[in-house]
Image (spheres, rainbow, N blue to C red):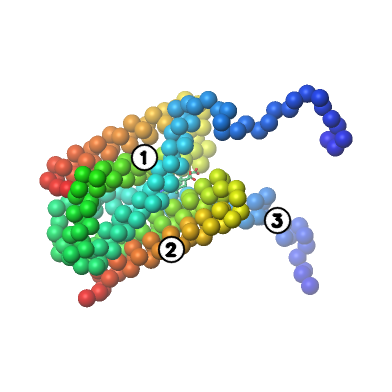
Amino acid sequence: MRLRTPLGNARGLGSAHEGTEVFWTQRLTSIASIPLTFFLVGSCLYLIGADYEAARAFISSVFAAPALILVVIVFVWHMCIGMEEILVDYVHSPALKFAGLIFNIFFSVFLGLTGVYAILKLSFGA
Amino acid sequence: MAGTRSPTERPLSPHLEIYRLTFTFLMSGFHRVTGFVLYFGMAIPVAWLLAAAAGPEWFDFVNGLIGTFLGRLVLFGYSWGLIHHMLGGVRHLIWDTGRGLDLVSIEVFARATIIGSAALTAALWLAAYALGGL
Ligand code: HEM
C-alpha cells in the first residue's frame, strides 16, 4: 500500500518528470569540454616534433594522464548524447533508428574504453 | 474543438524547407554538422593514443600518416571543426541563461563564431608551424 497522496507524488516533478538529466549532462559535458579542448590543443602544440620517448613521457606524466583521461571520457560522453539527439531528430524508421542508437553506444563505448586503456597502459604498462 | 469544421486552409507547422536560408540559420546548422563530424573525428586522438600504447613502430606509422598532406588537411579540418563547435557551444550556453536571444545578439554571435573560429584556427596553425613542426 502506498501512503503518499497523488499530490505528494506529483509535487516537484514538473511537467517533464524525467529526461532533464540528458539536458543537464549535455550542458555539464559542454562546459567541461571547453578547458579540456584547450588542454588537448595545448598538448598537441607541446608535442610537435616530439619523438616516441618524449610523447610517452608526457602522456604518462602525473600531470597529463588524468587530464587526457578526462578528455576522452567527457568528449565521448558528450558526443554520444549529441549523436543520440541527432538520430532521434532525423531517423524516423524504427529499424534504422534502433540500429543507429545501438551503433552509437557501441562506437562511443569502444572509443572511450580504447582511449582510456591506451593512457593507462602508457602510464602503468611495461 | 471537436466537430468544428473550417473550409479555410489552416497554416501547417513550418517545415525546414520553407525557411529562407539566412546566415544565422546556416551557423545553427553548422553547429550540428561540426558536432557530427567531430563524433567520427574522435577516432583520431584515440587512434593516436592507441598507437603510442602499441609501441614506437605504430607511433611512428600513425605520426607519418598525420604528417602527409592529406593527414594535415584532415587535422586542420578537425581543429577548425573543434574550435568552431566550441565557440558555437559557448553561444548555446549563453542562450541557456536566457541572455542574448534578441535578433542583434544572435547576428553578432553568429559572426563572432565564424570569424573567431577562423582566426583561432589560423593562429593555431601558425603557432604549430612556428614551433617548427608537423
Ligand atoms: C569544445 C567544447 C564543446 C562545447 C562547448 C560543446 C557544446 C555543445 C552544445 C551546447 C551542444 C548542444 C547543441 C544544441 O543544444 O543543439 C553540442 C552538441 C553536440 N556536440 Fe558538442 N561541444 C564541445 C565539444 C564537442 C566535441 C569534442 C564533440 C565530439 C567528439 C562534440 C559533439 C557534439 C555532437 C555530436 C552534438 C550534437 C549536435 C546537435 O545536437 O546539434 N562536441 N555541443
Rendered image quadrant of residue A77 = bottom left
Report the chain holding disc 3.
Answer: A
- Beta carbon at label 3 within 8 Å of ligand 1: no
Mark 2 — residue? A109
* Res. A11 mark: 3
Q: Quadrant of residue B48?
A: bottom left
Residue A43 in the image: above or below residue B103: below
Front one among B134 and B130: B134
Side of B82 where B98 appears, left or right: right
Q: Residue at x 39, y 46 (%)?
A: B37
**Comparing marks 2 and 1, which lies closer to the viewer?**
2
Between B21 and B107, the residue placed more toward the observer is B21
Q: How many numbered circles are shown?
A: 3
The residue under the point 15% across, 56% down is A50
Q: Residue furthest left?
A: B132
Residue pointed to by mark 1 = B84
